[in-house]
Structure formats: C-alpha cells, structure tokens
Image (cartoon, rainbow, N blue to C red):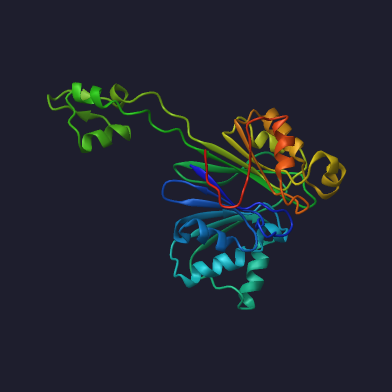
C-alpha cells in the first residue's frame, strides 16, 4: 500500500500546491479521499488509471474538498467506464449530483453507488471488501465532517519453499493452494496443511485520514495504532486561535493527536496559503512527533 497526496493546499490552490485530494493505492486498485478542483489532472500526472478507481470518500462539503468530483465522474463516463463506483460522503452529495445531471453538467453512464452520511456516534463502516475495510468517524469542523480509516485484513504468513519441498509438495499450483489456506496432498500421498509451510499471519496495513478538524477524541480514536496518520496542519501554533475559529488544527495539534493515538507515522497536509514554504509546520510537528513527513503534491509514500 502507498499514499499519493494529489493536493496539499488549504482553501485554494497555489502555484505549487493543488487543493485537497489523496490516493491510497493498492495492488490493482486505488481509493480517492477528497476530490478538490483539478484532482483529475493530478491523477493523470501520477499515472493512475481511472478505470482502477474503486471508491471515493469525501470528508465534507467545502469546495476545496469536493469541487473536482463532477469533472472526474464525467471524465470516467466519457471514457466509457462500466464498473460500479462507490461514493461516500456527507448528506447533500446526492442533491448536488442530481442538480448537475438535470442541468446536463455531468455525464454518468455507469453504476454509481452513493452512500450519504449524517450525524452519527462511534465508528461506522463506509466500505468493505474481502481485503480491507474503510471505517469513518465524525470529526469537529465548522460543518458536518468525517474522517476515514483503511484497515487491510491480515495476510497469510510467508511461504517456506524449502519446507514445502521437504514435505514432497512440488512447485506449481499446489503451492498456491497452500498459500490461500487449502490442504493438499504431497507426492507421497501425505496430507500437508497450510500451517506446515506458512509462517505466522502478517498484519495488514492501516491508514487514517483526518481533514478538516479541530483536535478531537474522534480523530484520536480513528488513528489508534495506525501505520500512517494523514492529518491536516493548516497553521502553526501562533495562529491557534484562528485554527479553533475556523475548525482546523495546527501542526503541533496534529502531532499531539498522532502521539496520543499511538500512530507509527504522521503525514501532515492541508497547508494555509500563507505558508509558501511549509517548513515551519514540519519543524513544529517534529518537536512533538519526530516521525512526521511533510506532504507534497504527487510524492509517493510507502505505508
């Protein structure tokens, strides 16, 4: 799994930073979190195939987080997408898309599964496959806003080639069956169990995405023991009062959230345009949580 920030600016794009969007990329698919203006151009620049986009997740209905939705959905229609797309976000998305369709502004000719959320308590499953689950919690912004977390299922342990050969299982399809948990017969007629040749299960990767929000318990819960927390850091501490007023977090507050949640790594993003160089935000966060990375548009970060 890897993440690619497609936009790291708060409120409006700058010459170097697009507005909020981030891709979580897996082996044969990717997920999109927020879709600010120009997101589809950023997707093209990093070479992500729109046909492999499985689901989109919108945090809230401020334009810098969803103004790119209509364009991206229409492009996939023009490209003759046929597979279903799942779209999760706050209540209001359906009305927005229905209005644009009625005015012939957007073109969607493929199945669009829309999951609208309203105020809720505790974690809610937003999307689930056999390989991972996306859960969501309500955050603390000026309007209804939600954060997301991706948890991969545990993966089988590493395959012991030497042990398989010793047990009389030749290389080929039988190895694959063992790796997916099936019993097989050896060349000498003995039963071989997956546990005979597989190491202990490997935990899946986890990523939490918290934009836009004041510091809150829900963000900490969402990021509990996560491999990578992606958290907004709109301001430095000198503007903490402004951050509180507008429903945002400082870099220091993002770092405290990561520390309290026990996150392994922190990626800060969503920088105010008052910081042409966001280095002060990184310094502030690292004083509290050293394993912090500064998001930049179009960089790839392995989880």
State the residue in front, 163 or 275: 275
* Image coordinates for residue 89, horizontal then vertical, percent: 64, 54
Task: Examine the rendered structure and indicate whether residue 251 appears above or below residue 183.
Answer: below
State the residue in front, 216 or 287: 287
Horizontal side of 182 relative to 34 (left or right) equals: left
Task: Examine the rendered structure and indicate whether residue 51 appears above or below residue 195.
Answer: below
Q: What residue is shown at x 73% (from left), y 52% (from top)?
A: 276
Q: Is residue 116 visible?
A: no
Task: Examine the rendered structure and indicate whether residue 231 appears above or below residue 13.
Answer: above
Q: What residue is shown at x 53% (from left), y 51% (from top)?
A: 31
* Image coordinates for residue 149, horizontal then vertical, percent: 59, 41
Q: Is residue 150 visible?
A: yes
Task: Examine the rendered structure and indicate whether residue 83 appears above or below residue 240.
Answer: below
* Image coordinates for residue 153, horizontal then vertical, percent: 47, 36
* Image coordinates for residue 262, horizontal then vertical, percent: 64, 28
Q: What residue is shown at x 45% (from left), y 51% (from top)?
A: 29
């Amino acid at each position: 799994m890897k993440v690619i920030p497609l936009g790291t600016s708060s409120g409006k794009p700058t010459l170097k930073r697009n507005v909020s969007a981030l891709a979580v990329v897996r082996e044969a698919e990717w997920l999109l979190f927020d879709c600010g203006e120009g997101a589809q151009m950023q997707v093209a620049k990093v070479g992500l195939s729109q046909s492999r986009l499985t689901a989109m997740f919108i945090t809230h209905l401020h334009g810098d987080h969803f103004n790119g939705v209509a364009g991206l959905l229409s492009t996939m229609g023009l490209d003759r997408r046929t597979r279903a797309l799942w779209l999760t976000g706050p209540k209001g998305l359906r009305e927005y898309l229905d209005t644009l369709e009625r005015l012939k502004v957007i073109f969607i000719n493929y199945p669009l599964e829309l999951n609208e959320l309203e105020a809720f308590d505790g974690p809610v499953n937003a999307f689930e496959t056999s390989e991972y689950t996306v859960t969501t919690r309500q955050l603390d912004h000026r309007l209804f806003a939600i954060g997301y977390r991706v948890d991969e299922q545990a993966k089988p342990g590493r395959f012991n080639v030497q042990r398989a050969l010793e047990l009389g299982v030749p290389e080929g399809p039988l190895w694959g069956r063992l790796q997916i948990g099936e019993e097989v017969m050896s060349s000498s007629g003995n039963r071989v169990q997956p546990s005979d040749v597989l190491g202990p299960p490997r935990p899946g990767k986890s990523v939490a995405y918290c934009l836009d929000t004041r510091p809150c318990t829900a963000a900490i819960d969402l990021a509990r023991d996560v491999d990578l927390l992606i958290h907004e850091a709109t301001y430095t501490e000198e503007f903490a009062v402004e951050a509180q007023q507008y429903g945002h977090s400082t870099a220091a507050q993002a770092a405290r959230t990561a520390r309290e949640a026990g996150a392994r790594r922190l990626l800060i993003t969503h920088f105010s345009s008052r910081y042409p160089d966001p280095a002060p935000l990184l310094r502030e966060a690292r004083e509290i949580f050293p394993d912090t990375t500064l998001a930049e548009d179009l960089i790839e970060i392995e989880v």
